[in-house]
Amino acid sequence: MLINLLTGLPVILICLVLQALFIAWCMRAYLRFRPYTRASSAILPDILVLSAVMLLLMLGNCLQMALWAGLFMLLGEFDNFVTALYFSGVTFATLGYGDLVLSPPWRLLSALEAANGILMFGVSTAVMTAAVSDVFKHNLARHAQHQP
């Protein structure tokens, strides 16, 4: 059990740093493009900025899945990266289909990745919710200004 924790902990820490990095990029991108969405009453700028935030967050989560898949390859758990990435994606998203499993010595890594994934998706959801809420509040205020 200890070897699983010691093996998974560095990957979890790298995932935390990656998540923080992608959130920082999202915030900077959102703040950079927010004036364009505020200046326009069209819906397209809102769609574009929210899509960019979602895309960056998803890219960050996919990189984390790939990092876990790389660990599984290093441990010899899968024969090819595509299979390792599939297992990692299913585990990171906490779906846990069960069609692929790690060997008994490394099974605890699945639980570590799932815990890591649910935390990262939760943080991504919080960032997306904040962006959507900001856009919603701005549009609500704009709508209220145009009411007689």
Image: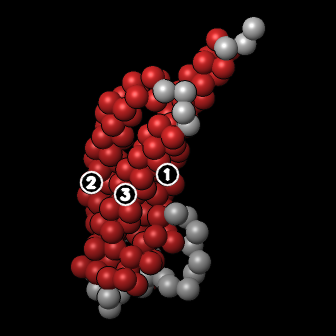
Q: Which residue is mark 2?
A: 14
Q: Which residue is mark 1?
A: 121
Q: Dot 3 surroundings within 10 Å: few (below 14), some, or many (20 or more)? A: some
Q: Quadrant of the C terminus?
A: top right
Q: Quadrant of residue 82?
A: bottom left
**Badge 2 element:** helix
Seen as rendered, the residue at the extreme bottom is 79
Seen as rendered, the residue at the extreme top is 148
- Which residue sits at x=28%, y=44%? 21
The mark lying in front, picked from 2 and 3, is 3
Q: Quadrant of the N terminus?
A: bottom left
Q: Quadrant of residue 67?
A: bottom left
- Which residue sits at x=26%, y=58%? 10
Q: Which residue is mark 3?
A: 59
From the viewer's perspective, is residue 126 above or below residue 93? Answer: above
Q: Is residue 3 left or right of residue 103?
A: left
The mark lying in front, picked from 3 and 1, is 3
Q: Dot 2 surroundings within 10 Å: few (below 14), some, or many (20 or more)? A: few
Residue 84 in view (yes/no): yes
Q: Position of residue 145 (x, y in %)?
A: 64, 11
